Structures are given as C-alpha cells and as structure tokens.
C-alpha cells in the first residue's frame, strides 16, 4: 500500500481523524517516535530541552489503550480531531527513506470546546517490506511554549 | 451586589471546621479579595535565580495581578521591581525574559532606569526644572518590591509592606527545598528544559487541594494505570522498567499505600505529603550518584536526603515541590475559574544526567498539556467548577478523619488519606484573608 509517501501523510492523518488509533499506531516502525518539541521548530533534540510529548511505541500504545478504557473520564464526551493539511514538501529522499514537511491546522473538539493548533508536521519515513513506516513524526507547533489547554488526541 | 467586600466575618464563615462553601471557588468577588489580601500579603514564589544568570537578565512575571520584573544586578543580587514605567505606566519589557543590557529604557518616551530601578535619565530634562517631578513617585524611578527573599535560589516576594517574615511564614516546610537542593552534591540547582504551561479552567484552590489528595489516584487515574499495568504484565517486579513505566505504574497503588505514606501539616497552610514514602520512593538506585552524595554530605546525611522523597511539599499557596524527581509546580491564579499551572524541571550540579531526565520525563508524562495522566484530573477539576453551580448543596465536604483536636495543633503528622491537609489550607486561607481585610478596614 501507499507507494507514494505523499499519500501516506494524508492517510495517516485520516486514521487519526477517524479515531482508528490501532491502525495509526501500526504505521510506526518498531523504533518509531512521536515528538512534539516544547520549542517547536527551534528545538534540536528531545533530551536537552523538554517536550510536550516524546513517546516511543510503548507509550503510544499506553495512550491508545487508555483512550479505549471506559474510565478515561476526560473522554466523556469523547474528543474528535480534524487535520487540515497544506500541500507537503519533500525535504530529503533516498531509495529507502524520505523526510516530508506538511504545514497543518489541527482542531480538537470535545463537547462545547474546540482547541485550534497550527504548525508543521515533519515525517521521517522508512521503507519496509510492507510499505512506508514512521521512524519519527515530529510536530513543530507555532506556539508550542505558550500555555495550552489539554490536548487529548494526536496532533 | 457585593457580598464579601468589607465583610471579613462573611469571608471567614466560608471556611468551617470540616467543610467549605462553594463561593470560595466560584465568586469573582472572592477572587478580587484574594488578589488584594491573600496573594499580596504572604510570600509567593516568583521564580528561580538560575532563570537570570547574568547581570541585566530579567524575567517578567505577574504576581497577584501585578506585573513584576525579577532582575539580576551587576553585583549578583536579584532584585524585583514593578514592570511599570514611572512616567506613564508603559511596561518596560513585554518579552517574558531576556537581557536588558546595562539599563532599562522605556520604549515610549525613553526614560531610563538602572537595573535596580533607580532613575537614570529623561529626555528634555530642562522641561522638568521647577516642576514637582522629583517629589512625585514618578521621579523616584521604578517602584521596587521591598520584601524579596532568595532562599537557596528560590525567589519569593511579599508585595505588602507588612506581613509575616519569610522564615516565620514557611518555617519547617523549608526543609523540602533544602532536600531538593541538597540532592545536588554541589548544592546547586538550575532550571532546565523549559517550562510546561497549562491553562486549567478551575479555581486555583481546587488544584492545590488535589496536590494533597491521595484518595483520587485509584479512581481518577484508572484508565492510565490500567493501561500501563496491562502493558507491563508478565514482567517480574525486578525487571528494569523503562522510565515511563517506573513513573506511571505507582499511580495505581491502592488506598492502603497512600494512607500509609503519611502526611504532615504546618502552620500557614503548608504541608508535606508522603512523609514515610511515596510514589517516587522506588526509582532505580544509582550507585555512583549515591557515592558522590556520601562524599559531599557524609554517610548519614546523604542517606537522610536520599531516603526522603515526599509525594508533594506544598508551600502555600503558590508552590509544590517534588524533591525526587526534581520538579516543581507553580500555581498562578488568573481568575476565579482559570488557573495557570507551570511545571519546571531542575538539573542538579554534580548529579548524573539521568536525574534531569527523570524530572523532564515526569513533567512530560504527568504535567504536560499532552500528559497521559493529567487529562483525567483536569477534566474533573473543570467538572467540579461546573458542578458546584448546582443548587441545593452549597458545601464541599472535607470531613475525612476530622478530629476537633486538630484545631489547636499547628503542626501534626497524620495518615496520608486524611483531608486535614486540605482543611489546613483553608484555615490558612481564612486567617490571611481576614487579617488582610481587617488591616485594610
Ligand atoms: S511612559 Fe515610559 S517614558 Fe513615557
Ligand atoms: Fe491526579
């Protein structure tokens, strides 16, 4: 599936918007990470400065499993999200890896309230026997270091 | 209609021995009175001196609705001034931090001030000859906060001219800052990794109560802890855990665990939860770090410092400290129904990088706007803020383990699930509010 990495990013966002979290998690490579740096685009690494989220598959699995638990109180009512993607750009491409940047708007809605975030998603994809897999999904938020309300799903 | 202004008796009546009135959380009038009589009259945490390492470095921070500037002086001291030009009130800086160079220059009409706020120069100086400027407050330079205490690099301010001294106000709970700083073999902490900031739509007191609430983790955090337990199932208790597991799994400890961890209350609303042990007690040992601690502090003192890892130490009403992991939360009330929570991590000089990683990881997992643990807390705080508007019952229950004998004992050690820690906060609240209102009357 998804030979063209351009389709991959739209597909990945659609899985989140459809709350198909298990299918989404399956897109990650075994050593894959999901990273939302606290300094946004200015941050060099996830170790010298903190992040809003820096998660390996184990932690992402924990999040996904938590969302399924009926006692996830903050999910009554459930949150829903919508990714609005701008055309993506290929930053770097080799025969078995590609780096993409996709500016986006992200809306997370729950009950009466909506959270609007914007920034650039940067995907580092690697080729596997079954298609592309995410080695890193990095989200550079426009206003990452400002005070934020709860963000409950995946940007 | 004003119900509380000029009525200290009505304010005091909101706090009873074993329950409190909902207006404490809902009333904007009470919030305005808190700005004036609570946050201004007692010692509030402003920031850490390591945020301003070099002369001219500043941090802008509102306290009790007043914009303040914490500034490093050329002689190394830390001063605090109002971020308000003496001419017409322009804020001297609008960045949240930075370096002013050798002096502050107002962007509006270019009045300048030394780093300690003293007046330096004004354009068209001759125009002030024969005027009353010198005699006016505006001629004195920036208004300075006189009561500033830098305790082991933790900077606190008291805005009001009168009030308790720093030592009298905090007393024994200062041991919690000592413990955190002494965890550095060199006795030095610096903030690191930035600050995680959350806006929570609830009253600040609710957040502070929850810091002392040990009965909620089992039910509130069930979704996160059950998911973690299921993922970790099959591992032997001795298996080395990834840091995230080490930090999340203990939230699922039972009532007995939290009860036995014990708590201690002090005068003025402060408390230490987890005087015996806590969810932070069983992080993996680090032999080399412990050796460094022994050579810095001696065998006995090092053991004492490392064995002490309370759940939370509350410096009422603005600061909560976790010695291990080295993290603090700062409570910044914005409105009756809106609170900013900051989570800061520290590097300890002479300690391995792993300690800093623990602080950052803990803050990220538990206090980030994208936390795995806090969403359920935040949802419930916001739910309480709505639920309290319901008619019928106007009271919030704090009855658990109430004992009239506690009323006469300023310092007391109790079981960990005792709501005394919260009652103690509200008693301090009523005391400070009434004292401030009576003094103003
Ligand atoms: S307001 Fe600052 S110089 Fe005029
Ligand atoms: Fe909690």
Image (cartoon, rainbow, N blue to C red):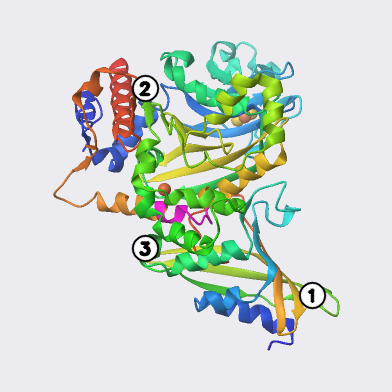
Query: Residue A71 got which mark?
Result: 3
- The stretch in magenta equals B369-377
Left or right: where A129 falls relative to A86 = right
Residue B198 place in picture, x, y as percent: 50, 48
Eye-nearest disc, 3 or 1: 3
**From the image, which quarter does the C terminus of chain B lie in?**
top left
Cα separation, mark 1 vs mark 2, equals: 59 Å
> Splitting the image into 4 quarters, where does residue B323 fall?
top right
Q: Residue at x 21, y 27 (%)?
A: B403
Residue identified by numbered label 1:
A98
Q: Residues within 10 Å of mark 1 (few under 14, many from 20)?
A: some
Q: Which chain carries label 2?
A: B
**Camera-side residue: B238 or A133?**
B238
Q: In the shown orientation, is residue A103 left or right of residue A151?
A: right
Residue for point 40% across, 62% down: A72
Disc 3: residue Cβ within 8 A of ligand 2's nearest atom: no
Q: Mark 2 points at which residue?
A: B268
Q: How far apart are marks 3 and 1 (CA)?
A: 39 Å
Q: Does the magenta stretch include residue B375?
A: yes
Q: Marks 3 and 2, how far apart in space? A: 37 Å
């Amino acid at each position: 599936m998804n030979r063209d990495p351009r389709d991959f990013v739209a597909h990945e966002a659609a899985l989140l918007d459809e709350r198909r979290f298990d299918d989404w998690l399956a897109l990650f490579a075994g050593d894959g990470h999901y990273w939302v740096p606290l300094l946004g685009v200015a941050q060099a690494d996830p170790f010298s400065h903190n992040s809003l989220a820096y998660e390996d598959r184990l932690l992402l699995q924990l999040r996904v499993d938590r969302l399924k638990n009926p006692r996830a109180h903050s999910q009554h009512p459930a949150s829903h999200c919508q990714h609005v993607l701008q055309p993506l750009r290929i930053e770097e491409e080799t025969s078995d890896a590609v780096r993409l940047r996709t500016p986006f708007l992200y809306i997370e809605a729950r009950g009466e309230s909506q959270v609007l975030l914007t920034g650039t998603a940067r995907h580092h994809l690697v080729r596997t026997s079954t298609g592309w897999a995410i080695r890193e999904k990095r989200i550079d938020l426009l206003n990452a270091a400002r005070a934020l309300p709860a963000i409950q799903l995946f940007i | 209609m004003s119900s509380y202004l000029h009525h200290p008796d009505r304010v005091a009546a909101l706090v009873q021995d074993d329950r409190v009135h909902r207006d404490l959380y809902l009333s904007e009038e009470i919030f305005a009175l808190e700005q004036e009589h609570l946050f201004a009259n007692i010692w509030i945490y402003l920031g850490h001196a390591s945020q301003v390492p070099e002369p001219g470095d500043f941090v802008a921070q509102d306290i009790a609705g007043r914009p303040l500037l914490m500034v490093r002086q050329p002689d190394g001291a830390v001063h605090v001034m109002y971020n308000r030009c003496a001419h017409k009130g322009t804020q001297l800086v609008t960045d949240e931090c930075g370096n002013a160079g050798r002096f502050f220059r107002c962007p509006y009409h270019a009045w300048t001030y030394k780093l300690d706020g003293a007046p330096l120069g004004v354009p068209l100086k001759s125009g002030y000859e024969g005027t009353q400027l010198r005699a006016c407050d505006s001629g004195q330079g920036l208004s300075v906060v006189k009561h500033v205490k830098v305790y082991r690099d933790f900077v606190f301010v008291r805005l009001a001219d009168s009030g308790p001294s720093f030592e009298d106000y905090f007393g024994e709970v200062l041991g919690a800052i000592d413990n955190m700083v002494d965890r550095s073999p060199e006795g030095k902490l610096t903030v690191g990794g930035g600050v995680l900031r959350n806006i929570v739509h609830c009253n600040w007191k609710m957040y502070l109560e929850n810091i002392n609430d040990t009965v909620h983790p089992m039910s509130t955090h069930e979704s996160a802890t059950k998911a973690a337990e299921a993922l970790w199932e099959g591992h032997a208790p001795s298996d080395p855990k990834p840091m995230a597991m080490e930090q999340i799994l203990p939230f699922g400890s039972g009532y007995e665990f939290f009860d036995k961890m014990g708590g201690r209350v002090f005068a003025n609303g402060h408390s230490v939860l987890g005087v015996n042990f806590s969810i932070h007690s069983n992080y993996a040992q680090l032999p080399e770090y412990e050796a460094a601690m022994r050579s810095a502090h001696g065998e006995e003192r090092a053991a004492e410092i490392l064995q002490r890892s309370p759940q939370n130490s509350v410096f009422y009403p603005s600061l909560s400290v976790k010695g291990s992991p080295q993290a603090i939360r700062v409570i910044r009330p914005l409105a009756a129904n809106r609170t900013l929570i900051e989570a800061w991590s520290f590097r300890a000089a002479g300690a391995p990088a792993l300690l800093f990683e623990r602080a950052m990881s803990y803050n990220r997992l538990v206090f980030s706007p994208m936390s795995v643990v806090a969403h359920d807390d935040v949802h419930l705080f916001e739910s309480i803020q709505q639920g309290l508007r319901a008619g019928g019952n106007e009271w919030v229950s704090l009855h658990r383990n109430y004992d009239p004998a506690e009323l006469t004992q300023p310092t007391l050690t109790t079981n960990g699930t005792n709501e005394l820690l919260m009652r103690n906060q509200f008693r301090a609240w009523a005391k400070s509010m009434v004292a401030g209102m009576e003094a103003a009357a």
